[in-house]
Amino acid sequence: MGYKRPDGRFGIRNIVLILSLVQCANSTASRIGLQCDAPYIGIDTGCGQGKVQAARTDLGLIAAGANPNVYGVLLVSLGCQWVKPDVIGPAIEKTGKKVCYLNIQDEGGMPEAVEKGVRLVREMQAEAEAQRREPCPVSGLVVGVNCGGSDWTTAITGNTAIGEMTDILVGRGGSCLMSEVYGFPGSDVAVAQNAATYEIGLEILDMVRDLRADFLQKNGQPISEVNPSPGNKEGGITTLCEKSMGNVKKMGSVPIQGILKLEDRNPPRPGMWIVDQRLGGNDAYPCTAYAMLGAHAIVFCTGRGTPIGNAVAPVIKVTGNSESFRRLNSMMDFDAGAPLRGEATIAEMGRDLYRLLLEVCEGKRTKAEINGDITYLIPAVIE
């Protein structure tokens, strides 16, 4: 049961989203969001970027507003920034979304802008609440899979359960997105062998080869010296190869359909897709990339625990570590640790996780949503 959109897609949430178009407007946007209990996205730019990076900022904002989980958008301008509301707004409106505009300088200052912004957001929220859910096909679902704050259980039960869920979802016509290219070295050949075609396999190998070379050139050290992280090592992961082989288990056994760029916006057909997001860091950036590509939800495995959420896509937190699930229950949604105790099979965990995914799609709130984590960090451009 979802919300039908004018462009033919559907959403699993009916969010009214607040977008700041320049760093100077971030506080105004956040105050409106807090008063309305609405997610907002701030940026650290809006002026002074070169042409290529400015285009990526525009893309990140437009893609956020265009995500199928969004009902309407409030654009908050200072009034003199480079990011143009008459570029961002119409691009979002093309997907059938309602867009309202706010200019701090025109409104007479920050307090006045906040007052008007709260009124506009609440009007859209009332409209969104009046919309009723309708039956929507599982085949239209797009789900990102990710992991972070990993430990030794992540590969054995957590990511493996996600892989089972991935197989079920793709088998029913849905789409899965997987990024975390920083975690591919060491398993790139295994990933390439799971590609749908020989040519796609070569593209995967080329992508990881370029990543290794770029990282060495820019940092003077191989990527294996900074990955795994200190927390990964404390959690029992010893090498990048070991981490990588656990990382890619989230893909399940379905063939990889190809590599997507952020500019692609949506998977062209159902199946498993790799998202080429190499810059910006771990966790928050790939999750933002999934949301930019139209993901309805993100399934995120963490052995050690992380509160990360997303401004437009609910994040389901999975752990293979039952002790972490107990100790950090306020952040965790699903305990995949039963197979380690001989109490369930990985296949059973995958089916249970798939059922939880559907419950979240039909309105069950995740812990990240309850906690109000609205992370959204636009990945940089590969130049």
Image (cartoon, rainbow, N blue to C red):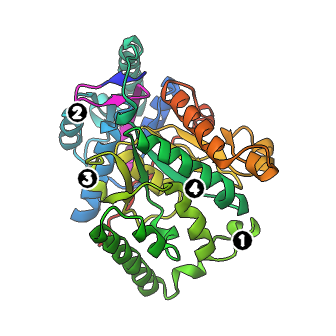
Neighbours of disc 2 within 10 Å: few (<14), some (14-19), many (20+) = some
Q: Amino acid at mark 2?
A: Thr
The first of marks 3 and 4 along the sequence is 4
User: Sequence-wise, which precedes: disc 3 or disc 1?
Assistant: 1
Identify the residue under disc 1.
233
Q: Sequence order check: which comes first, mark 3 or mark 2?
A: 2
Q: Residue 92 placed where, x, y %?
A: 24, 36
Mark 1 is on which residue type?
Lys
Cβ–Cβ under 8 Å for marks 1 and 2 = no
Magenta segment boundaries in residue numbering = 5-25
Q: Are marks 3 and 1 in contact (CB under 8 Å)?
A: no
- Residue type of the residue flagged with mark 3: Asp
Residue, disc 2: 95
The residue to which callout 3 is attached is 264
Q: Nearer the viewer, residue 55 or 248?
A: 248
Q: Earlier in the sequence, mark 1 or mark 2?
A: 2
Magenta highlight on residue 16: yes
